[in-house]
Amino acid sequence: GENVEQHPSTLSVQEGDSAVIKCTYSDSASNYFPWYKQELGKRPQLIIDIRSNVGEKKDQRIAVTLNKTAKHFSLHITETQPEDSAVYFCAARGGSQGNLIFGKGTKLSVKP
Amino acid sequence: SQTIHQWPATLVQPVGSPLSLECTVEGTSNPNLYWYRQAAGRGLQLLFYSVGIGQISSEVPQNLSASRPQDRQFILSSKKLLLSDSGFYLCAWSQQGDTEAFFGQGTRLTVV
């Protein structure tokens, strides 16, 4: 089955700096890669996603890149703000399967 | 619009007692349904997912089980809880195909 690895597990940046979180996946049939943000005590919420027919997608300060050959995808947050502090999860959905497998999460801290 | 309901929000149960967590989705039909567990406030571990009534796939062997008696109802059960079953349980749904998953509010289970 699908396996998703996420790095780093914790990330601390200064306000205004960029943050990058990287994920790899194992199932070459996976074709959907969402990113979720989870604030303390709350449910995860989608912030951006990318499908296998696209290499990059941007939404304001957030961008995601996908390298299908290498089976890795990354989240880029520019001009970080304290409210970006949260746990971020990457995920992958394999081929025809319904399962959605998550990475172990990255705790991002943005220092003012 | 679609909504997901998960209850209860918090639960304290003694070791050896049974468990039943219920999740229902409104405003859609034939959704994919998921149960995740989040221990220590970090990783999202997929426990079960279902692509249709009576179709349950188990990702991790454990003393938990899941059932889908109706199209938009997903139930997580245990006959005898263990201390290690404590955690934050999240139900989620998605449309069939490459679409995002929406999470319920979660149930914080403490086994004492």
Image (cartoon, coloured by chain):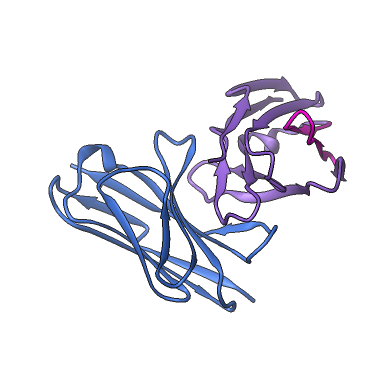
Chain colours: A purple, B blue
Q: Position of residue B20 (x, y in %)?
A: 27, 62
Q: Which residues are magenta?
A: A59-78
Dominant SS type (magenta): strand
Asked if one can make out residue A60 in the rendered structure from this viewpoint, the answer is no
- Answer left or right for A95 relative to B19: right
Q: Nearer the viewer, residue A76 or A39?
A: A76
- Answer left or right for B50 relative to A56: left
Q: Nearer the viewer, residue B103 or A60?
A: B103
Picture quarter containing residue B82? top left
Residue in the picture at 56% in, 43% down:
A101
Q: Is residue A100 magenta?
A: no
Looking at the figure, which quarter contains the C terminus of chain A? top right
Q: Is residue A77 magenta?
A: yes
Q: Position of residue B98 (x, y in %)?
A: 70, 57
Q: How many marks?
A: 0
Residue in the picture at 53% in, 32% down:
A104
Residue in the picture at 58% in, 79% down:
B27
Q: Up-down: is A43 above or below A90?
A: below
Q: Position of residue B77 (x, y in %)?
A: 28, 58
Q: Position of residue B100 (x, y in %)?
A: 66, 57
Q: Nearer the viewer, residue B72 or A12?
A: B72
- Answer left or right for A3 relative to B84: right
Asked if one can make out residue A4 in the rendered structure from this viewpoint, the answer is yes
- Answer left or right for B84 relative to B92: left
Q: Nearer the viewer, residue B57 or A13?
A: B57
Residue in the picture at 62% in, 33% down:
A26
